[in-house]
Amino acid sequence: MNEYERQHRIAESTKKMYPPGTRIELISMEDPYAPVPAGTRGTVKFVDSMGTIFPEWDNGRTLGIVPGEDSFRKLTQEELEEEKLSESVEEESTEEFIMKM
């Protein structure tokens, strides 16, 4: 197998592991100029042909992460449920605030 085929297989595997919509959390990033802060969560938008994962970070950044260089993890089902619960509580609080105005 040549290098192109190897890289293609890695990219396809990464696409299957991190489909669009997957929630992730950054552990560390090797970007020396403007890394995304550790602990930032985001939603995978796509994986390119080189296997770079491009999330939309919750802080608005869009910098891609490189598996093997940057450290990150998928959120657990429990964490996803906590996020959903937190979002619904925030929405209710916002609605109550608007009604009081």
Image: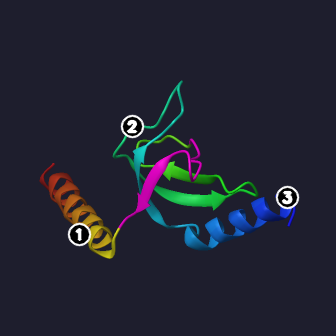
Instruction: Tell me which numbered mark, 3 or 2, is placed earlier along the sequence.
Output: 3
Magenta span? 63-75
Instruction: Tell me which numbered mark, 3 or 1, is placed earlier along the sequence.
Output: 3
Most common SS among magenta residues? loop
Q: CA distance from mark 3 to mark 1?
A: 44 Å
Q: Quadrant of the N terminus?
A: bottom right
Residue tagged by mark 1? 85
Residue tagged by mark 3? 4
Q: Position of residue 55 (x, y in %)?
A: 54, 53
Report the side of 27 relative to 88 (left or right): right
Q: Position of residue 88 (x, y in %)?
A: 25, 67
User: Residue at position x 57%, y 53% from top?
Assistant: 67
Q: Secondary structure at mark 2?
A: loop
- Image quadrant of residue 91? bottom left
Examine the rendered structure and indicate whether residue 1 appears above or below residue 65.
below
Q: Amino acid at mark 1?
A: Leu
Residue tagged by mark 2? 37
Q: CA distance from mark 2 to mark 1?
A: 24 Å
Report the side of 7 relative to 1 (left or right): left
